[in-house]
Structures are given as structure tokens and as C-alpha cells.
Amino acid sequence: MKIALGVTGGVAAYKAAELVRRLQQDKLDVQVVMTRAAREFITPLTFAAITGKKVITDMFGAEESGPANVESAIEHIAVAQRIDLLLVAPATADILGKFANGIAEDFLGTLYLATKAPVVVAPAMNVNMWEHPATRANLAALRARGVHVVDPDEGYLACGMTGAGRLAATEAIAQKVFEVLGLRRDFAGRTILVTAGPTREALDPVRFLTNRSSGKMGYAIAEAAVRRGARVILVSGPTDLKVPDAVEWVPVTTTEEMRGAVRDHAGEANIVIMAAAVADYRPAVMHAGKLKRGTDRLMLELEPTPDILAELGREHGSRILIGFAAETGDIADNARAKLARKGADMIVANDVTQEGAGFDTDTNIVRLFLRDGRDIALPKMSKLDVADRILDQAHQIQKP
């Protein structure tokens, strides 16, 4: 989701840099817009370095990108149309007055009038300015129009006075943004352990047995869980995927290594989601040197790998345990049997032969099988959306 962050000219402007980082942790795409006065307190370069984007500082773009042109002249309309929310923090008494009275003399004021996205303001100013009838009237007018206000905190102010007017805490502002956007934080305070990707079992120094798992489903679950406030530990087999921000990543290669990492961290977790495609068998012998090509058939002896999900199922207690089942037929029978056999609370099953549900796709088509007998079939959707639906059901599971 895309956020425009307006930074106005107050001492608290430096705190906006921390706010950008906090919003980015939840995968919000932040475009910073600065007023002329804001640049007296913090430089555009600071925000450009954090966001990786040009910071908008001038109505017509002349100050940072050469002479004005048609594109720069209508940039406020383009930004207004593509954002999901406009946040102004800190919001000075001056900008509140301009918003309340429809004054659009700079980019931020014009953006406010042009956007139909929800607006959140976090005022910060001297206590007397905060309590002035004009400021109160402007805030009342903005609230009446649906603007969301994060009231300032009380305390020692930069001017030396004490009272209301200090910019609200970064987390309080972020929570208001999440609330307005409809983003949930229902896993705050909980730890979720997720496994993802394939495992590899070596035959010799250059060959190994593995499967076609890309890890995308497990990584999507990890990302969705972080967005919803969880502490996430991601135990991952070899993939080419970018690790989601704020996730504690534990890389492994073999099934035995994954088993060890899961057992090391399972005690910290309230929920374990085993999305990895663990190799079921490994070569009984790992050859020290490369096996040379010959003309005769080569017979490989395989032995079963540890059943990590079943081990957890025998001892998970109050911890919620969720497994996956990649099937090529008889989904319901196989998933229900696995649910009982492994001692899991839920099995997420899919037919990997279906278009849009197989390996290395960005979508999935799954059915959720729960211990209470429910069978929930989901339509084709993005793996991130599937991850949220899995987490929705995990949140409802009640353990003794």
C-alpha cells in the first residue's frame, strides 16, 4: 500500500525519519513530501536515502529536477491518485489552518485537496498554539470532514514549556495508519515459527536429491505474519527469495538441519507453520567423491528422513501446529489422514497439478482441513492472500 507522508516545519520533523522506517517495516511504500519550512529542520536527502525515492519539495519540481514541465505541474494529481493514505506528521498549526480553509499554495496543500484517500494528521506545536481557539476550530472542521487526528502527547516541549503539543509516539501514529488502512495487528506479542522452501540431500559432492519447491508460500506466510504484528522465525531451505523485513531468518540445507533448527526454536513459538517441502528420503550413503558416469545402471538405496511434523505433533501441547500437504489426487482423504497421523491442528492441502496452484507460482488454490472437521476450500488467490487466510484460521484455533 502506498502512503504519502507530509513533513511540515516543526522541531519534531526529525522524528518523521523514524516514522518512515516504522511504516516500511509493515511493507508500506512511503513517498515523502516536504514543505519549505520542513527543510529548515531536516534535509530531503535523509528521506531520499531511507525511501530510495525522490522527495517532493516543490510544486513544479524546479528546485530538484530542472525547469518546470507538464509532468511536474500535474505531479500532485498523479500522487493523489496512486496513494492509499495521506499522513502528515508533524502537522503544524499552519498546515492545519491551510487544510481547514482549502489553501493550496504548495504541493502538500494541493495534494490534500486533490486526493480522495483517507487523511491522518499528527499535530505537533507549542502548547499555547495547540490550545488556541483557531487551532481548535481548524481541527474540528477537519474532523468533521473525516480527517483522522492523532492527538499530541503531553510533556516537556522544545520551547521549554510543558503541556500538550509534543508529537505522538511513532508507534501510536503507525497504529492509527494501520487502523485506517484496515491492516490488522492481531498477532502482536505472539511468535510464529515458519518453515519454507525445499531441503537438499547430498548424493555426492556435486549431486543432491531435492524437489521443485520455490519457498514462495512459506515466505508469504512469514511476511503476512510480520505485517500482523508477530515475531517471526523463518527456517528456510535453499531459495532465491528475499527475506521479508523484520523476520529472523535461519538458513538450512538438509532435512536434518531443518529438524535441528525447528527443535531449537519451537519452544519460543506459539504457532508453528510447516510450509517447507521437506525431502522424504535421502541417500543411505553420501559418497565422498563424485560418482563417475558408467554404462551400467546405478542403483540408489534411500532411507527415510526425520518426520519433523510428526515429532512436533507428539509434543506440541498448547502450541498450534499447522502442516502442508502437496498432493496430486485424493486431496481430502490424504489431508484428513495426514491431519490425524501427524497430530496437527490444521493441514493446508493443494493439488499441485492444478494451474495456478503448483510449484513456483505466485498464486495458490488450497483447502484448509481442521481438527474440528471443517473443510474450507479457497479460490485461486495470491500466496500472500492465502497466507492471511491461513493466519485467520490459526487465530481462531483454541487450545486447552
Image (cartoon, helix red, strand yellow):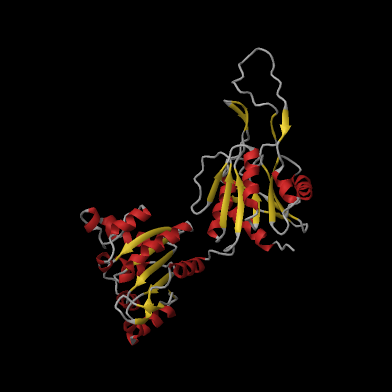
Q: Is residue 321 above or below residue 80?
A: above
Q: Nearer the viewer, residue 298 or 28?
A: 298
| Coordinates of residue 164 in the picture (x, y in percent) | 38, 81
Left or right of residue 274, residue 137 in this image: left
Q: Nearer the viewer, residue 325 or 190?
A: 190
Residue, far left: 67
Residue 276 seen anywhere in this rendered image of the structure: no
Q: Is residue 34 above or below residue 208?
A: below
Residue, far top: 295
Quadrant of the rendered structure where residue 162 is? bottom left
| Coordinates of residue 57 in the picture (x, y in percent) | 28, 61
Q: Nearer the viewer, residue 101 or 306?
A: 306
Quadrant of the rendered structure where residue 160 is? bottom left
Residue at x 77%, y 44% (from the top left corner)? 334
| Coordinates of residue 376 in the picture (x, y in percent) | 71, 55
Residue 95 seen anywhere in this rendered image of the structure: yes
Q: Quadrant of the C terminus?
A: bottom right
Quadrant of the rendered structure where residue 74 is? bottom left
